[in-house]
Image (tube, coloured by chain):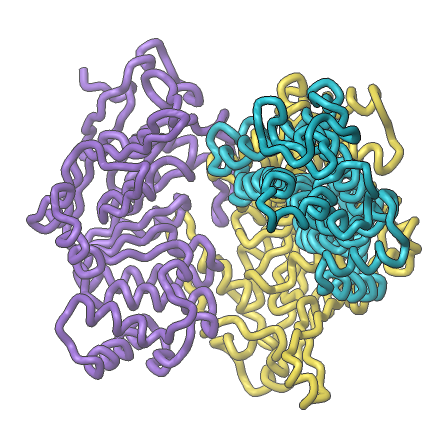
Chain colours: A purple, B cyan, C yellow
Amino acid sequence: MLLEVENLTTLFRTKRGIIRAVDNVSLSLEKGDFISIVGESGCGKSTLAYSIIRLIDSPGEIAGGKIYFDGKELTSLSEEKMRKVRGKEIGMVFQDPMTSLDPLEKIGDQITETLMEHIDVTKKEAWQIAREMLEKVGLPPDRVESYPHQLSGGQRQRVVIAMAVSLNPKLLIADEPTTALDVIVQEKIMDLLNEMRKEGRAIMLITHDFALAAERSDRIAVMYAGWIIEMGDADRLTKEPMHPYTRGLIESVPDVWVDREIKPLPGFPPDLAKPPEGCRFRPRCPLATEKCMKEPPGVDVDGRYVKCWLFEVK
Amino acid sequence: MAEVRNLATTIFSFLPEAEGRYMVLTGLGIVITVALMAIFAPLIAPYDPIKSSGDVLQPPSAKHLMGTDNLGRDVFSRILFGSRVVLAVVFSASIISMIIGVPLGLISGYFGGKLDRVLSILMDSMYAFPGLILAIAIAAVLGPSVFNAVVAISVVYVPTYFRMIRGQTLSLKSLLFVEAARAIGATDWRIMRKYIFPNLIPTLVVVFSLSVADAILTEAGLSFLGFIVSAPTPDWGFELASGRPYLPAGYWWMITFPGLMVMLLSLGFALVGEGLSEIYAPRRER
Amino acid sequence: MLKVEGLKKYYPVQKSSIEVLLTKRRDFVRAVDGVTFDVQKGEVLSLVGESGCGKTTTGRILVGLETPTDGRIYFKDKEVTSMEKDELRRLRRHIQMVFQDPYASLNPRMKIGEHLEDSLAVHGIAEGEEAKEMAMAMLDRVGLPGEQFYNRMPYQLSGGQRQRVAIARAMILKPEFVVADEPVSMIDVSLRAAILDLLMSFREEYDLSMIFITHDLSVARLVGDRIAVMYLGKIVEIGETRKVIHNPRHPYTAALLSSVPSFMKRRKRVEIIGDIANPIDIPPGCRYHPRCPFARDVCRKDEPELEGDRHLFACHFPLELTF
């Protein structure tokens, strides 16, 4: 296993109460795996990603659980060692490429700096690697001389990916990397991520777009209100969703090629400072029963993880 | 009125957690104390401010809290009554500047064009002039009187309101909810009144407090130079002027106490203004 | 219902003072560059394209937030472009808009109920108690119980709820025509369907005509009777939804379609080269040719016209494929 997250809990202490943004979440990832974490805004999917690279700032904290990555346990690692893991072993791509780019510095300088911080190369060698990296992500190598504002949104995201993979990380976490981009550019960025995967890297894609996850990943984990409520093979999960939320979500989104009505999901996501008692999806669930007043167990049904009383092992 | 009430609830709901709350509370404390002094001056004042109440040039004592002046009048009583003039002049002047500056800024920022360019140049050139000198010039032309001082001071602060309101209007104008109002078919007048003006109120409160703080100093300056009141009416700036010749001889109380009061009141308003702007600065709407 | 002919909107490019002194040429961003279409009574036309293709500008011109550089708009056979300011303002009642960003489209210092009443007051439809009653009823209608929501302020509402308010304040005027500009793209995924449902229920109730602007072809397919695809300020293909989706004739439509993520996994891929061109320097000939894998010489010289019977496309060598 490349990455094993065990019972991870990340919470935020706010004035309104304790928010368990990631609550007792476990998942694992092998080399070359492409997993998507799917959910709505506020479901904890980004917090999960940030927890793995331990970029959780006060008032948030990782309150429990373990993260094993490539033989190391990350939650107990010193900040200094963690800094080496970040970037070098786990690359990160964010939604807004400008958050990772310095507007006043040339692209080449930015990649070179990252390289020289982590590996022992001369400026000249690093500059050469930067050119190669740009070529690899489909940009002309002479773009090293450009400033971020001279590039389009899609090109900037390519640069960020180039930076993220320049240190050859084993895991690449992409947090809504294409949300701000048009579908045609999204397509190309996704192809690029897929190429990175083919080189043996594991990819974790955080997205709200179920269809995109279905199309691109091997496995999908669906998050709702801090929980993973269903996780399994992408194909099977989208064709035969088990959890009522997964099913509801799939039925509520239109699809270009499918001629069907969409069914709105009733209600809205809970306030995590005051989550509903028992199952957090209960207030919106058409199949809720008495039993759902208690937290449902996470069970394994033919290799699919489901956190719902409907699938309780008898 | 509803806007004012909204503002009040907004301020009070923010106060418990926002950074600037202590500044605002301290400032308000000072301002309210001085206001109470002015309102209840006849009740608090131990002596008649314009009549001699004992020996001349007595240092502060239990009988005369802040001593007596060169004519034997009680300095404390004169300060109490003086606060009335200060507050009256400064408040009426600031309200007049606001009444002139805000609509001009709003119209100028909202409609833009030639009118905006002309007004902006005019206001900027006024703003570039040092406030006190401009006020002295105007007061000198009009002649010394409380009314003329109010006019002089209000002219000085019109550009402050104009500039702030114009800038805010410009940025509010491009916001989506103003566009949405246009899309509904709202008239320009309605958009200014219901969509832009209410959103200017926070800025306005801040600018008002800060400009009052500044106007207090300007008023003191004018008064010092004798452009506002004449003897025997008490006014802080005027007290400074009449106490000045006696300072070298060691009669420090005639000048110290009025001076401190000018500083304190100005500080009070400045604290309210700065504190509020700190509270509003990170727009806390979820 | 609505007819648009040769609509253009050019924005002058901001230049530095040195450039202004040195050159005489003025550059323009050709945001909308000759758009012609019509919308029938009760029909929904989806306007799709990438960001910067001019779809939002087109919508803004229709509701009067921008004045066109050139072209004519007819609303119920009356020419809008030559109307007086006052007449135009009265027309607003019938042409309403729902904006993309529900967080910015409401006045932060105005109660939810007042937003609806303001719509009524602007057009002198109702005031006071009567207006309040109508507002309450409309809030109920959009799923925000009036009793609870009338007195709330916008910041107390979620994005989905705000968008309902935005819809309510447009619909309370019983418009005949609505421009919906990406009304769900900023809404949580699980709430989108409900907002779309709400919009479509008004469409039935009022027999609304609608322009639905979206970058999402799956939404366009769902709501639109017809789809118009825009590229660099021009419509490159327009026709019945089913036709455009399953038999796209323009290579750009095909490329766009083939890049939409779908649960069905992809069947065909149609290539598109490079990045979108700068709307200041629109390529000569067919404006799509630099990105088109099928471009030939003629495409670099002659600009194709939008032609066809009910399914129109602007391409010298239209595709024959079935998705």
Q: Please provide percent x and percent y for residue B256.
A: 60, 42
Foreground: A150 or B199? B199
Q: Residue at x 50, y 75 (%)?
A: C291
- Which residue is drawn at the image coordinates 37% and 81% (left, top)? A145
Q: Is residue A83 left or right of residue B209?
A: left
Looking at the image, is B241 positioned above or below residue B112? above
Q: Decide: is C139 above or below B141.
A: above
Query: Residue B37: percent from the left, percent from the top?
Result: 68, 26
Q: Position of residue C174 (x, y in %)?
A: 79, 34
Front-lying residue, C72 or C139: C139
In front of the other: B48 or B205: B48
Q: In the image, C58: left or right of A251?
A: right
Q: Quadrant of residue A312?
A: top left
Q: Is residue A189 above or below residue B41?
A: below
Closest to the observer, A79 or B117: B117
Q: Is residue B99 left or right of residue A151?
A: right
The image quadrant of residue A158 is bottom left
Displayed quadrant of residue B141 = bottom right
Q: Determine the residue positioned at 38% across, 73% down.
A: A105
